[in-house]
Each structure stands twice: as structure tokens, then as C-alpha cells.
Image: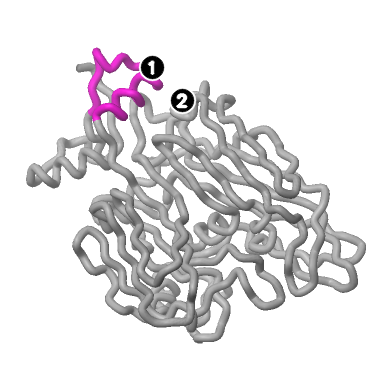
Amino acid sequence: MAGYKQLFPLPVKTPAAGGNSVVELEGIAGLDARVAGFMFELTGTGTTGSSTQAVTPKSLSGLLANIDLDSDWFNVRATGRLLHHLHKVMYGASLGQGETVTCTTGGVAARGYYSLPCIDERSLNPFDGAVPCKLFSGKTISINYAASLTLDLTVDVVMSALSLRPYAVLVPSSGPKLPMRSMIRYEDFAAATANIQKTGYMPHLFCYSDSAEGATAAGVVTAAQYAQFTLQAGGQTLLDRVLTQHLLAQFGSRMIRDSGQLMSYQDSVNLDFIPLLFPTNSWKALQQPRTGGTVTIDTDSGTATAWRYAYRMLLDTDPALEAEGARIMGYDPAQHSVQASTASKAGLEGSASRVNRAHRILPKRIVRA
């Protein structure tokens, strides 16, 4: 689908240490459009006590401690740093990479941009995941801020005069249609074997750290900590003791187009994240790993003592959820039904099990019963 994108401004918020902001989405619920995602601009003044210090969008992202959106169609449990990394996992480059500034004792304005995507523009049908605005009726985005507004870098940077400007990224309506459901979340584990208990298709998965960056280079991961990975989902082994260096090499060859974005393969080099799952261009939902209820990740080599995994998933629907979605969009479920929406507009083909799986995951057209 070719179409414009529009940034629709949502109410501006003023972050405070340990505080919370609630972004109301009722203002977009009446628009005849779809939400491709949300974008946040975080600005503030950074001041150091004695010398200069570079402040990057990644540094600022640590001030966004938790970002939550409880929606049946787009469910989010994220952090600012997760969103910063997710953009590179999906597109091979960080959003706002050129926004690094050097703070001084006099104070310098710092800025970071963070994207919360409902869609992946590298997929074959990217706007299948764009959510009709009506489905956000009564929903909010809740944002918790870090307990301290001091960035724990090599030299501490005290942030002040903070402002958070959220936007909804809108694309044209596609008529009576329910979207593909999606989820962005992170989970923490204290053991080398991690089980993510979710059912759906998982195109994106990575390991990262949300701890303070600091002079000791926390907030990063290394190949020495996480030396190799085994990954199983839906009864299939997707990674079998694959070295982190090999994952980084594959990610670099498939995803990175700018040499400045390449990630080092050395054991001791600090990494923002370790990519585990990332699809090729023009990917299809049904070709992604299906979890079957559990994704098991093993790191059987390395010095790590804690594990945080972030993932983006496509989720099944069910008749009750589809009927409720149609009702919210203004269609009487007693007089309308839903059909799987395909790019060819043809019916689903294949075995009964494949047709059933496809119907649960694909977007739906709302038609008269």
C-alpha cells in the first residue's frame, strides 16, 4: 500500500524523577485513519559538574524506565532503551543516530527520538499491522521515568527542563478491516535457560541490558558474557550453539547498510544488544518462527548472571476478540462476520491446519454476514 504518513501530536508531558505520565489516546479514536506506530521526542538540558561528556539518544533513553500500552491489538511493555535498540534490530540503524551532543558545565540541549512500531516496513505487507484509530478508544500509554534524572556516564550529566513530545504516526484508513495483532515486550531471567511463554509468530528477538551505562560500561552486553545461543520454538531448533560473533556477522551482512552502524565481533567489545531473530526483506508473517506456546533460549557458555530478552510478536485472534473489534469499529457482530484478508484477495488455500493458522494471524475484512 502506498500512502502518506502523518505525525499527529499527542499531549506534551513533563518528565520528573520517579514520576509517571499518562498519554491519553482518546484524541485519535475518532479519526478515520490507522496507527502505524508512535514516536517520542525527549528533550532536555544536560549539565556536567566539571568537564564535557557526550550524551547520545541511547543515554537519554534510560530516563524512560517503562512504557506500557494495554491493548488487545497492540500490547506493549517496553523501556526507552528497548525502543532505541529495536529500531536498529528492525531497520539496521538507530533512530536519531546523529543527535549526539556534548554537554558542558554551562549546559547543552540534548535530544532523542524513539519509535514504538505497530508495523515493520520491511515486511511484504507492512500495513497489515496498522491499527484503526477506533481500536484505541479508552486506551492510554503509561510512561514511568527513572528514579534519577542524572545520567550515570563517565562524567555524570544532570538533566533538567525535560519535555516528552509523543506523536501517533498515522496512515490512511483501509475501510472495514481488523489489523494483525502485535506485541512488544521484554522479560527478565536469572538462569541461563529462559522460557518465554507466548503463542504466536516471533520475527524479532534480541538480548540487551537496561542497567545504567556508567564508567564501567554497564548498559551493554559482550560476547564474553553471552558466548553462544541455542534457540527452540514450536518444536524446531532455530539456533544450535551459535556463537554470538556469528550472529553479529549475519546481522551485519543482512541488515546493516551503513558501515558506521556495524557491530564488533570481539569478545571484550561492548555491544548494545545481541540479535537472535531478524527476518529478511519482504518477509511474510506465516514464514516466521511460530512459538507453539514456548520459546526456549539457552546460553550455555559465558559469564552472564542475568538475562533480559526483548521481542516483537504477531499474535493470534479468536472469534470473541474479532467480534469485539468489529463492534468497537461500529459494526454489529450479529450482522457482520470477518474473513482473513490476503494480498491477492483470494481465499486461503492448503491443509485445514494451515488455513486455521493463517486465519488466526492474518488481518480480517469485516463483511456482511
Q: Hey, what amino acid is under mark 2?
A: Lys
Q: Position of residue 102 (x, y in %)?
A: 80, 67
Q: Residue at x 66, y 60 (%)?
A: 57
* Label 1: few (<14), some (14–19) or many (≥20) C-alpha neighbours in 10 Å: few
Quadrant location of residue 142? top right
Which range is magenta?
319-338
Marks 1/2 in contact by CB < 8 Å: the verdict is yes
Please state if 315 lies on the left or on the right of 292 as rendered: right
- The residue where tag 2 is placed is 134
Q: Which mark is residue 330?
A: 1
Quadrant assignment for the C terminus: top left
Quadrant assignment for the N terminus: top left
Q: Residue at x 61, y 39 (%)?
A: 167
Q: Position of residue 96 (x, y in %)?
A: 63, 58
Q: Secondary structure at mark 2?
A: helix
Q: Is residue 159 above or below residue 216?
A: above
Q: Is residue 141 above or below residue 321?
A: below
Judge by depth and name the residue closer to the eye, 171 or 181. Answer: 181
Please state if 183 lies on the left or on the right of 40 as rendered: left
Which residue is outermost to the left? 351
Q: Residue at x 27, y 42 (%)?
A: 361
Q: How is the image coloured?
A: one colour
Q: Is residue 14 magenta?
A: no
Q: Residue at x 51, y 39 (%)?
A: 69
Q: Position of residue 352 (x, y in %)?
A: 8, 42
